[in-house]
Amino acid sequence: MQKKTEAIVVEAERAHCRLLAEALDEEGRNLIRKYWGIEPAEGLERSFEASSLCWTILVDGRTAGMFGCSGGEDGTGYAWMTTAPDIKKVRLRLIRQGRQYIDRMLQRHGALVCYAHVENRPLLAWLQWSGFRVEGREGDFLKCVLSPSLPVENDEAKEGGASCVCRR
């Protein structure tokens, strides 16, 4: 009988940045190098340091993702998420539980913005389920926004009709 995959979300620690950077696949590392212009561990450490809220996703005890939110001077929060291949084992659980973390971000910030790479499926799924809407595209990135004034229709998101989805 196969053992059930364990997934927990914990408050992030600096050490998780290096562990996640090591767990990323080559494509993930190359995306960070290309778009951030720095090595993955440094990019994750910068995101960790800038974030007022930050969590780590552990899958079977291994760092499989990090996400959080940094704040802009106008009160807007900037949500982010970086995941390793192990996240695929728990993707649906993460998406379903993700709204509680989004709500905590919204309590701290009046609105949330996330720039999601069009091929970052775990992030786009999380944003879609959480009620984000696309407000534009900048190159390979979708500008996804969530504001308390925007209706959150999770039933629509479950059906794949929410607009924070990359369709080619």
Image: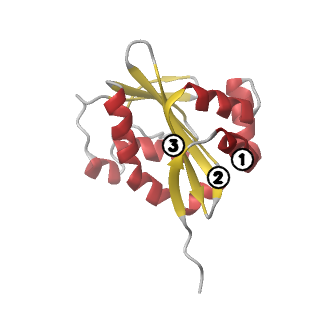
Which residue sits at x=39%, y=55%?
A: 96
Crowding around mark 2 (Cα neighbors within 10 Å: few <14, some 14 to 19, many 20+) is many
Marks 2 and 1 close (CB-CB < 8 Å) = yes
Please name the residue shown 59% across and 47% down the image: 65
Mark 3 lies on residue = 123
Query: What percent of the width, then of the height, locates residue 128?
Result: 39, 43
Give the residue pinned by disc 1. Answer: 19
Tell me the distance, in whole angstroms, between the alpha carbons under discs 2 and 1.
Answer: 6 Å
The foreground one among 51 and 119 is 51
Name the residue type under label 3. Leu
For label 3, the SS is helix
Horizontally, residue 104 falls left or right of residue 17, namely: left
Disc with the residue nearer the chain's start (2 vs 1): 1
- Relative depth, front residue between 120 and 79: 79
Return the x and y of residue 125 as percentages of the image width and height: 45, 47
Q: Which residue is mark 2?
A: 63
> In the rendered image, which quarter is residue 18 located in?
top right
Which quadrant is home to the N terminus? bottom right
Q: How is the image coloured?
A: secondary structure
| Sequence-earlier tag: 2 or 3 | 2
Viewer-side residue, 126 vs 15:
15
Left or right position of 5 against 162 = right
